Image (spheres, rainbow, N blue to C red):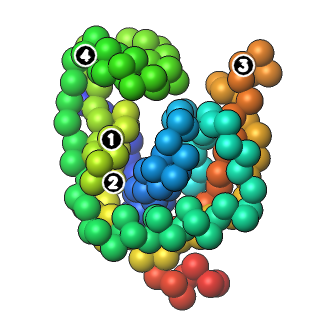
Amino acid sequence: MIHMEFKMNDLEKLRHSTAHVMAQAVTELYPNTKLAIGPPIKDGFYYDFDTEHIFTPDDFAKIEERMQQIIDGDFSFNIRYMKSDEARRYFESIGEKYKVEIIDDLGEDQVSLYKQDTFEDLCKGPHVHSTGKIKAFKLLQIAGAYWRGSEKNKMLQRIYGTAFPSKKELRE
C-alpha cells in the first residue's frame, strides 16, 4: 500500500481529532454503539453511530463532559498499520461491521488505525499530536443519516459538532 494521508489544514486536523474523541466518549457511555464514519466538514465534524440509544440534545452535556475528561488526559494519537485481512478480522471480532465494509471497499493491502487512550479506530489521519491540543468544542445537533447515503441501508444517528483552537474563536 502506498500510504496517503489526506492533506488537512490545522483546523481540519483539530476537528477530525475531536470527532475521534466524541466517538470514544459515545462508545464508552453507550457500550453497544457501532461506529460508521466521522470526518471533518466545513463548519466542524460529525460521526455516524448505530445504536439502540436514541440521542437527544439532552445527551450532549454528558457526552461533552466525557469528551473533556479524555481531552484533559492529553492522550497521544498513535498510528499503527495492519494488513487489511488482519484489520478485517479485528473489526469483525469486536462487531464493527461498518469498519469491515470500509476495509473491503478500500481494497488496500494495508490500512491504518489511530488510537488515543483505550479507543482505536480505522482512520487515514492525520490528527493533532494529542487530545490535550483540543481547546474548544461544542456538540451542535443530531440528524439521521443512511449508511452510505442510500435509503436501502440502515438509518444511523449523526452527531454534529464543531471545534476551534480557542474558546474565543468558538464563541465567535
First reached walking from the N terminus: tag 4 or tag 3:
4
Q: Of 89 and 19, which appears nearest the observer?
A: 89
| Separation of marks 1 and 4 at Cα, in angstroms | 15 Å
- The residue located at (50%, 20%) in the rendering is 97
Hey, what amino acid is under mark 4?
Answer: Glu
Hey, what amino acid is under mark 1?
Answer: Glu
Where residue 120 is drawn, which disc sits there? 1
- Residue 124 image-quadrant placement: top left
Does residue 74 lie above or below 124 as drawn? Answer: below
Residue bearing mark 3: 153
Residue 134 is left or right of residue 75, and the answer is right
| Residue at the extreme bottom of the image, as rendered | 168
- The residue located at (62%, 70%) in the rendering is 61
Residue bearing mark 4: 86
State if disc 2 and disc 4 touch (CB < 8 Å): no
In front: mark 4 or mark 2? 4
Per the image, label 3 sits on a secondary structure element best described as loop
Hey, what amino acid is under mark 2?
Answer: His
Residue bearing mark 2: 127
- Confirm whether residue 88 shows in the render: yes
- The residue located at (27%, 54%) in the rendering is 117
Q: Of 72 and 149, which appears nearest the observer?
A: 72
Where residue 152 is drawn, which disc sits there? none
Per the image, label 1 sits on a secondary structure element best described as strand
Q: How many labels does the image show?
A: 4
Per the image, label 4 sits on a secondary structure element best described as helix
Where residue 101 appears, x then y in whole percent?
Answer: 49, 17
